[in-house]
Image: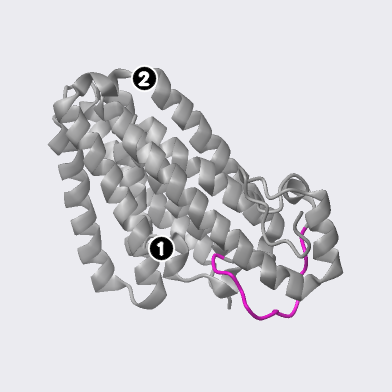
Amino acid sequence: MTINYGKISVCFFLAGCLVYLILLLPSCGVNLHLYEYFGVGLLYYLLLNIIFWTCLRGFVLQIAICSTFLGICNAVGVMLLCFSTLPWNIFGCYIFYLSFFHYSEFLAVALNKPDSVTVDSFLLNHSFEYGAAAFASWAEFLVEQWLFPGLKQYYHVSMVGAAICTGGEVLRKLAMFTARTNFNHLVKSEYEEGHRLVTNGVYAWFRHPSYVGWFYWSLGTQLILVNPLCFLVYTVISWRFFHDRVWMEEITLLKFFGEDYYRYQQQVGTGLPFIRGYEINPP
């Protein structure tokens, strides 16, 4: 019998999210301290981990640990967004988008390509650089809140960032569900049986809609936090990353699909600003 890891992850994600909300909603009218939001979440997560390590094993244990962690983070974000004040409500908005992104990455792979889903599908350990960028954004937010608290009062900038994050998230997931089994988090160097060139849906708009979504999502997170320095750094680093990624990926796609992919290149752009991809006959 095939185990539906997607449904299992949903159960654990909701267990983390909903129970946390149930625990704190009776206190929503009380002006809770910031440490109380995070403290309750941490204690609840530690309790769940004791239960998980006692009752579960293998991949299901890994799913439980990651999904409940992201579910609790998602709920913490919701509580801060709804019941805290500036600037911590915008930090809650950021936590909401960040945790949902990582959980939805796993869920999309589990539903579309269950045979290849692993704990890495959460992208929580994406790379050292990705983790360093996240920590840098948190550090900038906290330092600027301490030194220049007025900077974090531009709520309209955060709302623009939230709108961009929403658009980027939706576009990326549409790309994943359109490509289905043809989508991979890693660039494939060898052709797999059944792999086909996807040119319909959002792939008729952009050659790399999942990268377009992720690119703008990452910039949106820094607008939510009103982080001017990290916004500039994220723009440069993300652009460079996707420039190199698209160039490398299109070499393999031309090898896999030949003339079909070449014609597709001529008809549809990458969708990423000033990134043309790998060109056989550059102008």
Q: Name the residue under label 2.
A: 155
User: Residue 174, position in %: x, y?
Assistant: 65, 48
Q: Can residue 92 be seen in this view?
A: no
Quarter of the rendering containing residue 187: bottom right
Picture disc at residue 17? none
Label 1 SS: loop
Q: In this view, does 104 lie above or below 189?
A: above
Q: Is residue 140 above or below residue 182?
A: above
The stretch drawn in magenta includes residue 218:
no
Q: Main secondary structure of the magenta part?
A: loop
Crowding near the residue tagged with mark 1, few <14, some 14–19, many ≥20 C-alpha atoms within 10 Å: few
Crowding near the residue tagged with mark 2, few <14, some 14–19, many ≥20 C-alpha atoms within 10 Å: some
Label 2 SS: helix
The stretch drawn in magenta includes residue 186:
yes
Q: Name the residue under label 1.
A: 126
141 left or right of 57 in image: left
62 left or right of 44 in image: right
160 left or right of 139 in image: right
Closest to the observer: 119 or 64?
119
User: Residue 116, position in %: x, y?
Assistant: 56, 73
**What residue is drawn where x is 71% and y is 53%?**
207
| Quadrant of the rendering where the N terminus is positioned | bottom right
The mark that comes first in sequence, 2 or 1, is: 1
Q: Give the range drawn in magenta.
A: 185-198
Q: How many labels does the image show?
A: 2
**What residue is drawn where x is 29% and y is 19%?**
153
187 left or right of 231 in image: right
Q: What residue type is labelled 1?
A: His
| Quadrant of the rendering where the C terminus is positioned | bottom right
**What residue is drawn where x is 47% and y is 25%?**
160
Q: Which amino acid does label 2 sit on?
A: Tyr
